[in-house]
Image (cartoon, rainbow, N blue to C red):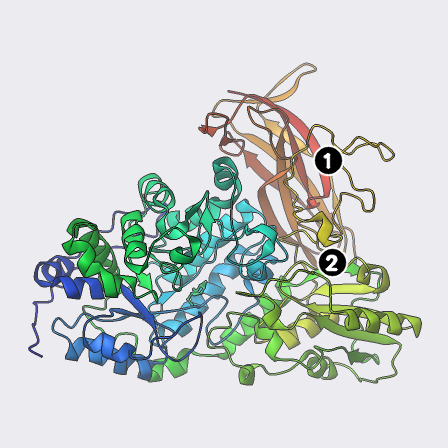
Amino acid sequence: MKKLVLPCVIALITISCSPRQAKTASHPKVDSLMRVMTLEEKIGQTVLFTSDWSVTGPSMRDNYLEDIRAGRCGNLLNAYTADFTREIQRIAVEETRLGIPILFGYDVIHGFRTIFPINLGMSASWDIEAIQESARIAASEAAAAGLHWTYSPMCDISVEPRWGRISEGSGEDPYLGSLIAAAMVRGYQGDDLSADHTLLSCVKHFAAYGAPQAGRDYNTVDMSERWLREFYLPPYKAAVDAGALSVMASFNELDGIPAHANAHLMNEILREEWGFQGFVVSDYTGIMEMIHHGYAEDLADAGRLSINAGVDMDMMSSSYMDHMKELVESGKVSMETLDNAVRRILNLKAALGLFEDPYRYCNPEREKARTLTPENKAFARSFAAESMVLLKNSGVLPLRKGEVVAVTGPLAQSKDDFLGSWRGAGQVESVPVSIQEAVGEVTPLSAGASKVILVAGEPWHWTGEAASRSSIRLPEEQTQLLKKLKKEGKTVVLVLLNGRPLDLSEESELADAILEAWYPGTMGGYAVADVLFGDVNPSGKLPVTFPRNLGQVPIYYYAKNTGRPYVHPDAKYESRYLDVPNEPLYAFGHGLSYTTFDYSEIMLEGGHSQSGQGVTLSGDGTLKACVTVTNTGACEGTETVQLYIRDLVGSVTRPVKQLKGFERITLAPGESRIVEFTLDKETLSFWRQDMSWGPESGDFQIFIGGASNQVKKASFKYAL
Ligand code: GLC
């Protein structure tokens, strides 16, 4: 094939990671390419196929290399290593007419080779800096393996423990989820997308994928616009505001329209309201699936609906490849719409530096040098320990090094489960020890010991995509084993490896201590031992509510008060159950330490006081809420001090609590520290009855404490 060589204008375009999306300039190289590209070549740039290296969806594409050689496919997922991507890139660059480089994407979700805790676990650390660092390390390893683009952060808020993908997100809270989403974008993208250690991030799954009815993956999502905007959209927006430059559409419908053809989401909210300048990619065969949704007549119709709604790239449906030519030639899709999609994609290839050097990311020596380094593994170990949540402790923890213990349970020797789902290129061979081995390196093991570490939970493939469960209990045999051990008079420390909130109502009565370890990643064995034997004092806090049973679901801390709140224990006509309390087993924000913390009453500073009226914050003013936190125990500990507010009366009903701030502090025994939060009108703002965003005058409550149900309370007024 005659190759057309274009002058490569080296022009730097900045992809801003500033809070607001800088308008992505159209790279001069892109403009010159667009002028000479044929219709077929333009369509090829909107096509994304998978390699045959791993399967992340229901179909495969056999002749993807021929598609690339023919210019029918400009983007590839699930291909990595410097050598493999270099060979594929060579085909694109040297054997096609225009030599447009391939964009290589992959699910780098919680690490690439060095695997960190699953995202629900990371979120339990509430350590935003560490979460950002984990994304930076993941990007450095992935970019060294030829990758340009990760399908992360997953920003789906969820209060659905049956849903297997709750493991991939940041839990139930939009405030915490927003901080985490933005941190991951900063970690992946850094401040230069063209650097060989950064990745283009992808905000997914847009939108509200985490609210499937009955917790069944891919199931119907239906909620009010208000609920969507208040509780589900904030993390996506935070990621876009942090500079994310690709977005992935979600499989679900919303308000009867599949996200893959939902112009309200993709154009009105994402582009017009939020100023998003990147491109939108479908999820795996998501465009084709609109036929099953009963929204598209056939594959051509699905493609028309999608691209006209703002979906620029087709992952694995072949709709754009097979039908876009006829759609454009028939006028069902305008040339401008296609050009916009192509330009958005080529702009990001330019921003990644691929036109200057298509092989920039394909360096085997750098790949080897950057992967699974001692520093990466050391960070993974400390981060895993920080993600763990001590749910219960009768005093048996920390264990003493050298004391005789037994380690048992179905996951005691597992390494594979540490990696969880979406484990990237993580390999079990890279996991140094199981929990049993790690404990054995610290203390004698004896099957007959009176203290038993019972390692239980869910096998890793019980969570992740297409892994919803109708029960959230542990496998019955595990509960029976715990009962047997207790009947034998053992002291039992239950260590859980799992990816969702579980119904631990029986286990919480039987076990002497419960450590929620999630799927803790490559260094998980050592991290569990570090916590059990006190080298690390646990500091994790639940990012999601643990119910007493499935009957309470959905249950979340930002509940509404209802017209008949349950306040009188024996009352009948109040919102309650006959068989269980309304409160969860473990509340949002719950997590114990090996020390204890005392909170002073809340002091309010600022605003103005009137005799008998309390403190009033007005207009654009600020109000400081302070508490003194004291470590009243015998060892150093880290506490996440949480700030919640309640708007007592609004033009729409308001939650009984909403997280609006938190601060992680580390205190030595006996040490006290004043923790100060600043509130302003933005803190108090919400989607008012007329769907405008802003505060309303009235009475407010402030709650500060170490968990959503362990708080000090104060009140103030706000006056517009
Ligand atoms: C999957 C997932 C999505 C992932 C994509 C590519 O179906 O829904 O999260 O990024 O396909 O693997």
Q: Is residue 26 visible?
A: no
* Residue 348 in picture, x, y percent from top left: 26, 60
Q: Mark 1 points at which residue?
A: 601
- Label annotation for residue 503: 2
Q: Which of 501 and 492 is in front in this view?
A: 501
Q: Nearer the viewer, residue 341 or 361?
A: 341
From this view, report whether residue 236 is shown above or below residue 88: above
Q: Quadrant of residue 3?
A: bottom left
Q: Which of 29 and 328 is in front in this view?
A: 328
> Is label 1 within 8 A of ligand 1 (CB to nearest ligand atom)?
no
**Residue that appears at 22% across and 59% down:** 324
* Residue 472 in picture, x, y percent from top left: 69, 60
614 left or right of 454 in image: left
Type of residue at label 2? Asp
Type of residue at label 1? Glu
Q: In which quarter of the image is residue 149?
A: bottom left
SS at mark 1?
Answer: loop
Q: Can residue 613 be seen in this view?
A: yes
